[in-house]
Image (spheres, grey):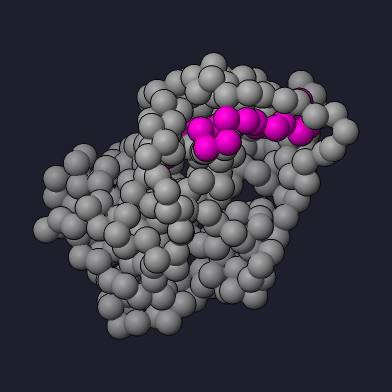
Amino acid sequence: MKIVITGAAGYIGSVLCKEIVGQLPFAKISAFDNLYYKQWDHVKSFLTHDRIKFYDEDILDWSTNLTQAIADADYVICLAAIVGAPACDKVPELSTDLNYNWYEELLGKVDGSQKIIYPNTNSGYGTTPEGTICTEDSPSNPLSLYGKLKQDTEDFLRKEYENVICFRLATVFGLSGRPRLDLLVNNFVYRAVKENQLDIFDGHFRRNFVSVRDVCRAFVFAMRPTNFDSMKGQVYNLGADTLNSTKLEFAQKIQEITGCELTEHSNKTDPDKRDYLVSSQKLYNLGFTPIDTTLDQRVRELSVFCSNIEDTEGMFNY
């Protein structure tokens, strides 16, 4: 099995490479990443293996290595992106090229046999009325350039390419080869540990979460041949339904674990207006079950990690 992973040295990609090597003994990975966040020292242990060939390349350049690897691939997992609304807003042209335009070129490089796995974000649900649980049939309402580009790419791939599975990822949390301390849970733990204080705005806003390990487990689940054949052409929410919660609820869990102070403010609002709950039951019905159904273990790991770091260069996507 030959696998191409773009963004292989990123937050999800580094963990995914390790998961594939551990779970798929005949898989060989062509791993592409331009090390945008100068993260090689963090990820090299995740990408150093005799079944992983790493290419320090920008996929927008369409090198001979990338073109040939995709032509030969059984699977193409598309993780390279400018990720997050703040990061996309800083470089909108690059974000459009990488998060959307590149996929138009990709479909000119494949012959239809390659199986594509594409991660969208479930932040495309935007805001929903209280009591609403978003399913894959719920309307999209992205509130940012990032959300719009990801949704547009999902729509394009599903319309133009049969051999594709799209996941809509919940807000991801947990440790990785390339740590991200801007993600909501990770950031709250970082501030709780370093500042001993959490300030919460719009604590009633709701979100859905999933651990980075469960994201990678779901990708490997989809790569099992019988699973891919039954899943292709479809979109699947990917979250832990037990981790549908308000910002205040998960902040209180972090307070319980770290012992930090917690203050909820009513005189200011959060510029991030996403507010939704999500069901991943469609994926669960196929046999996938998340392992991290509570925040506890991963928050404790993050707490230890944050206690021991001084240099956070490359750990924030803005």
Outermost residue, right side = 267
Residue 239 drawn at (x, y percent): 52, 32
Q: Nearer the viewer, residue 16 or 104?
A: 16
Q: Nearer the viewer, residue 226 or 36?
A: 36
Residue 42 at x, y = what percent? 32, 55
Left or right of residue 198: residue 299: left
Q: Quadrant of the N terminus?
A: bottom left
Residue at horizontal 39%, vertical 71%?
34
Q: Point out the image quarter for the C terminus.
A: bottom right
Residue shown at 53%/20% (left/top)?
259
**Is 193 within the magenta?**
yes
The residue closer to the viewer here, 263 or 295, is: 263
The image quarter in which residue 253 lies = top right
How many numbered discs sit on the rendered protein?
A: 0
Task: Left or right? Give the position of 241 relative to 47.
Answer: right
Residue 55 visible in the displayed image: yes
Instruction: Estimate the x, y position of residue 105 in percent, counting from the top left.
Output: 49, 76
Magenta segment range? 192-212
Image quadrant where residue 191 sits: top right
In this view, the residue farthest toward the left is 50
Does any portion of residue 185 appear in the rendered image? no
Q: Would you place residue 139 above or below residue 10 in this image?
A: above
Q: Position of residue 237 (x, y in %)?
A: 55, 37
Q: Is residue 270 magenta?
A: no
Q: Residue at x 57, y 30 (%)?
A: 196
Q: Residue at x 66, y 57 (%)?
A: 86
Q: Is residue 248 left or right of residue 284?
A: right
